[in-house]
Amino acid sequence: MIDILGTILPLIIYLLLIILLVVVIILGIKVVIVMDRVNQITIDVENKIASFNKLFNIFNITSNAIDGIIDKYSRYFYKTNNLNRREDED
């Protein structure tokens, strides 16, 4: 009985180790495939963000120009209003 267990038990352990090795190899291949897909998705997202950055830069330039124009006219009206008040006070 002990002789049979001494020969069969290592065979069962080797068989289980071979099965485990095959499963680990298959999972490793699947992980590589998933990582490749994640990399492609990341590249696509980066490209879309870059296109949005261009759009946001256009908005930023436009808002800066509008802000400059409004600031220029508000200073002009502030100065003319102050001049009118000073003339009224005199």
Image (cartoon, rainbow, N blue to C red):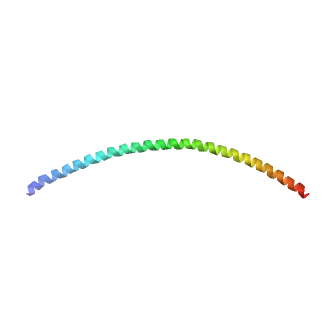
**Residue 18 screen position, x and y as percent:** 22, 47
Query: Compared with residue 1, is residue 21 higher up or lower down, i.e. above or below?
Result: above
Q: Is residue 77 left or right of residue 38?
A: right
**Residue 6 screen position, x and y as percent:** 12, 55
At x 82%, y 51%, the residue is 79
Q: Is residue 40 left or right of residue 20?
A: right
At x 23%, y 48%, the residue is 19
Query: Compared with residue 7, is residue 47 higher up or lower down, i.e. above or below?
Result: above
- Comparing 7 with 25, the one in front is 25
The N terminus sits in image quarter: bottom left
At x 66%, y 46%, the residue is 63
At x 37%, y 45%, the residue is 34
Query: Compared with residue 4, is residue 60 higher up or lower down, i.e. above or below?
Result: above
**Residue 66 screen position, x and y as percent:** 70, 45
Query: Which image quadrant is residue 56 in?
Result: top right
The C terminus sits in image quarter: bottom right
Q: Residue furthest right?
A: 90
Q: How many marks?
A: 0
